[in-house]
Amino acid sequence: MPIVLAAYFISPKRLKTLILFLASLFFYAWGEQLLVIIMLTSAVVDFFAGQLIEKGFRKLGLGMSIATNLSLLGFFKYFNFTFDNFHAILDGFGYTGDFFDTLPTIALPIGISFYTFQTLSYTIDVYRGKVPANRNFVDFACYVTMFPQLVAGPIVRYADINDQLNNKEISFSNFHKGVERFIIGLSKKVFIANTFGAIADGIFAEDIGNLSTPMAWLGIVAYSFQIYFDFSGYSDMAIGLGRMFGFKFLENFNYPYISKSIKEFWRRWHISLSTWFRDYVYISLGGNRSGKYRTYVNLFIVFFVTGLWHGASWNFVVWGLFHGVFIVIERVGFDAWLSSRWKPIQHFYTLLVVIIGWVFFRAADLSTALLYLKKMFVYSSGEVSLNSYLAYHHLTPRTLFFVLVAVVFSMPVYKFLDDKVLPERIPLLRPVVFCSLFVLSIVYIGSETYNPFIYFRF
């Protein structure tokens, strides 16, 4: 990172994009080796597809882009899922052959769901006339491969950074803001997400039949904190890194756990993905322009695809459709009734639906998810000795402190602190706070072996 930053800042303006492109290729190839070819193939195809669209071969260019990208994504992400389900169906009819045992296990290239959607947004926007086709392959490939947000988002649309590729806002002020944002994300990840991740993993690893109802709730609430602070922390780091290189990526989270409806939750959660599906799937299907029943069908399609995008598993499909059901219920009229209720009731309803949904997201399979939900809502004392051990192991003063921290920072508290507590008129306080957070984060990473980035698998 220091080498890349040094090379980037001392190089002339015309070479900065090339350096960032080469650094991104090196970064991805270091971990994925030959799988970098898949990402480059997507970039090359979409670059020329944009040219074809602009030269008048509109349907050919768009079709080539969609077919290539969805074929690559479908093969690498859903090959094994498809044949596993096909195998299960044939088994139900008495199939006893060994054909499926000979099929290879296809490795999932890291970040393929993100860069595939990025390049598709480019060709669709060129087709719709929203952006001109890029005529510089290095600029376009830099956009596709940019390492700050490559492996876990946010999904950056070409239209949002087209002008920035050649007019980056490189300044000490931008770099300083980027460093601060990176440190915030790193702190959220290593202090909060990892703390609750250890609790969730420990509880979900136990035999569900032995868990008590309170312990089951502890496990899923811990996971709810983990996934939010893990993913929003990574998004903060990506946005901060982008800012350091002169790019302004759009926000990806806006305190989703303060939402008062599921509709509002999806306006605040993983914003780059939800708006992508809104603009490129929901609107393309007709949106709400073809009557209320067609609108409901379109919403279910969007949330089915949203679930499937997260992983090749029926758990994710059920999770997506579960949210789709409540989106439709709210649209039918429940939203109007809910908005007139006491606000704590609105919050309670939203958090309850979201937390139940996370069970499907976290459990190993559907049967496990259903057993876990039963444990949550049908009281059980569980295996007393086991639950006593888990409670003693997890409910330490340190954990309780981070519960308080997680609750507070799930709300718009940082903006208040940034404006009121860390103002520039106290010049030494701000750098001391951020340097301390950074050093403590590095110490934590160096001393702990538990450091999962759970969104890498999507």
Image (cartoon, rainbow, N blue to C red):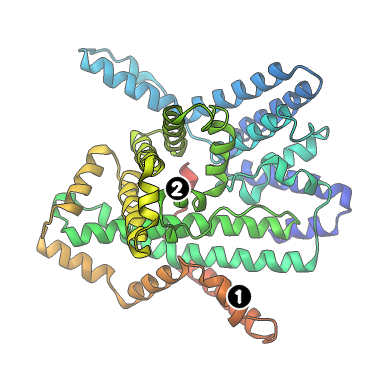
Q: Where is residue 81 in the image (x, y as percent from the top left)?
A: 38, 27
Q: Can residue 197 be seen in this view?
A: no
Sequence-first tag of 1 and 2: 2
Residue 273 placement (x, y as % from top left) = 54, 43
Residues at circles 1 and 2 in contact by the CB criterion of under 8 Å: no
The residue that label 1 is drawn on is: 418
Quarter the N terminus occupies? bottom right
Callout 1: SS: helix
Of 276 and 155, nearer the camera is 276
The three-letter amino acid code for the residue at tag 2 is Lys
Residue 180: which quarter of the image? bottom right
Residue 120, percent across and down? 63, 31
How many marks on residues?
Answer: 2
Q: Residue at the location (29% across, 15% down)?
A: 98
Classify residue 250 as left or right of residue 191: right
The residue that disc 2 covers is: 263
| Quarter of the figure with residue 65 | top right
Q: What residue type is labelled 1?
A: Asp
Distance Cα–Cα, label 1 vs label 2: 29 Å
Q: Which residue is drawn at 69% across and 29% down?
A: 123
Q: Provide the secondary structure element on which disc 2 rests.
A: helix
For the residue carrying disc 2, how many other residues have a C-alpha within 10 Å: few (<14), some (14-19), or many (20+)? Answer: some
x%, y% of residue 325? Answer: 35, 39
Q: In this view, does 276 lie to the left or right of 244?
A: left
Q: In the picture provided, is 54 more to the left or to the right than 67?
A: right
Residue found at x 49% / y 54% = 231
